[in-house]
Image: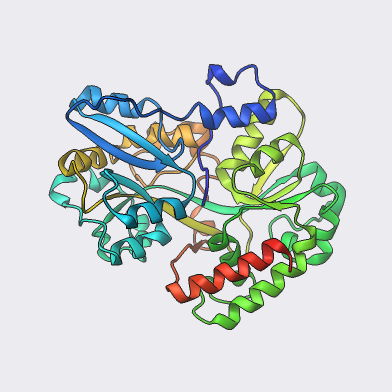
Amino acid sequence: MAMRAYRLDKDSCMSKSPLRTLFAASLLCAGISTSVGAVEPEVFLYNWFGFIAPQTPKEFEQETGTRVQMDAFDSAEIMQSKVMAGRTGYDVVVATSNVLPSLIQAGVLQPLDRNQLSNLSHIDPDILSQVAVNDPGNRYSVPYLWGTTGIGYDVDKVKAALGDNAPVNSWDLIFKEENISKLKSCGVAMLDSPSEIISIALHYLGLPSNSRNPDDYQKAQALLLKIRPYVLYFDSSRIDADLADGNICAVVGWANGALAAQAMNEKANTGRKIAYSLPREGALVWSENLVLLKDAPHPKEGMAFINYMLRPEIIAKTSNHTLYPNANKDAAEFVERKLRENSWIYPDKKTVATLVPLEPLPLQLERVRTRVWTKVKSGT
């Protein structure tokens, strides 16, 4: 996965920007630079770019006296390779659900002392159960934010291309050649994420989304190569900006990106309508989780920070900032109503039951998937 954080409004540095600049600014304004000259006590956080409410680190410091130093990454692969190498100097890391098993098996995480997590009771037990698929017993991680991968689209452009009965509630919109070929003129893009796109393709074919059968990946490859001529590009950082600007009309992407694109069009009064679909066959669901590194230089402060982020009123600020739902069952009253009541972000239980979890693969099959992705992106 790649850049995740967006902001709807209230950022003065965004107020005079055109849509593309506005979208980029929403990412840039979320960052907090690491300052020189450490102040003790401190905690070092390694997180997705902009994946925390800007005021939260400062408020943590004001309350506890512990300064938060932050570095950012924009892909899970970069984070994983850096953490695996060890001696990073980081204490707390945000790790995607399907990366957890490899980090646990490599021995780079330390079990979380629940006696130091007094706020753990706020976490939704259903989400804990989902995370337990990748972290048995929830020993090494606590869920932070979560999200879905579905279809974002320009309502009017898709309707113009496919008519009133466009299958926007189905992956048929993307994976049936007769549909995507008609969308080529207005532009289709996808995340540059093999773990997500190939998992979705497998599920669409009626195969396990994390199949252990190498032959299944050849079937997914055939499906993706069939529609490849109609995909404009694969990129995780620009698809939602292009959707907001009208440069493309359909994306396989994240819910919060579509919501940000919609909000920017509403703010700019363009008249363009953006929507998001969780296809009836099942969209992808994943979580981002807080972990403590085994060689954390400040484990006590790291645990205190994790516990702080489990407070309902604290994590709600990050949901409001990033437009991602959080895993805290008691945070709803602090989440902005327009976000809390948005079915793209907080789908109902019936829809949640159809979601497919992002899961890890053995190294041998990871290599198979990587080869498939290389061929799909090149179109050969």
Say if residue 118 shows up in the picture: no
- Give how far across and how far down residue 322 sits, in percent: 48, 36
Residue 215: quadrant of the picture: bottom right
Q: Is residue 141 left or right of residue 343?
A: left
Instruction: Give the residue displayed 55% in from the left and 29% down from the top.
Output: 26
Look at the picture and state if 224 lies above or below 291.
below
Instruction: Give the residue displayed 49% in from the left and 70% down from the top.
Output: 366
- Give how far across and how far down residue 79 sits, in percent: 41, 51
Question: How many dots with numbers?
Answer: 0
Look at the picture and state if 219 lies above or below 226.
below
Q: Quadrant of the C terminus?
A: bottom right
Say if residue 47 shows up in the picture: yes
- Of residues 124 and 361, the one nearer the viewer is 361
- Of residues 218 and 206, the one nearer the viewer is 218
Instruction: Give the residue displayed 29% in from the left and 67% down from the top.
Output: 105
- Of residues 88 and 16, the one nearer the viewer is 88
Q: Is residue 270 left or right of residue 280?
A: right
Look at the picture and state if 50 lies above or below 165.
above
Residue 52: quadrant of the picture: top left
Instruction: Give the residue displayed 35% in from the left and 42% down from the top.
Output: 46
